[in-house]
Amino acid sequence: MAARAARRRDVGARLERALIASAAAQGGTVSVTEASWIPWASATFTGARHRLALDLARTPAAQAWLDALPELDLPLPGHLVADLQLASRETRNGRLHVVLEALTVEEC
């Protein structure tokens, strides 16, 4: 049971690392400026709801990465990204500031 609780605590950091790596693979650099998550459960699954604020350069590669996010397969050991949505996107001082919302579930 302790291992399961530790996996839940790490899921936020794992999601951040997966997003940063995914952006880097597309030629972009992402900074996570804020991140939070809360436990989530349904009748059959347990997981977490996440909210992340990201800062990235406004480039064609960054735009393409953001557009593809809902369909990306992000590697998240011990978890699956069940839903990933762009909640907001704005440009400030030539940079993109976005908020993502995600749902992760523990693998059975």
Image (cartoon, grey):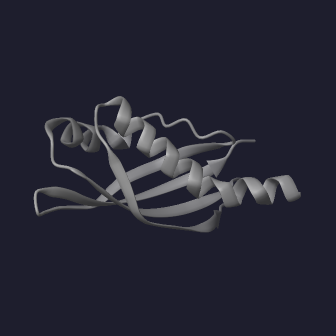
Q: How many marks?
A: 0
- Residue drawn where x is 27% and y is 44% of the image: 66
Extreme residue in the right direction:
1
Residue 101 in the figure: left or right of residue 75: left
Q: Percent x, y for residue 77? A: 65, 39
Residue 6 in picture, x, y percent from top left: 77, 57
Q: Tell me if residue 58 comes above or below residue 38 in the rendering.
A: above
Residue 83 position, x and y percent, is 46, 49
Q: Residue furthest left?
A: 94
**Residue at x-position 69% and y-position 53%:** 45
- Is residue 60 depicted above or below 83 in this figure? above
Q: Is residue 22 above or below residue 53?
A: above
Residue 21 occupies quadrant = top left
Q: Is residue 37 visible?
A: yes
Instruction: Choose top left, top right, bottom left or bottom right for residue 67.
Output: top left
Displayed quadrant of residue 39: bottom right
Q: Percent x, y for residue 70?
A: 36, 43
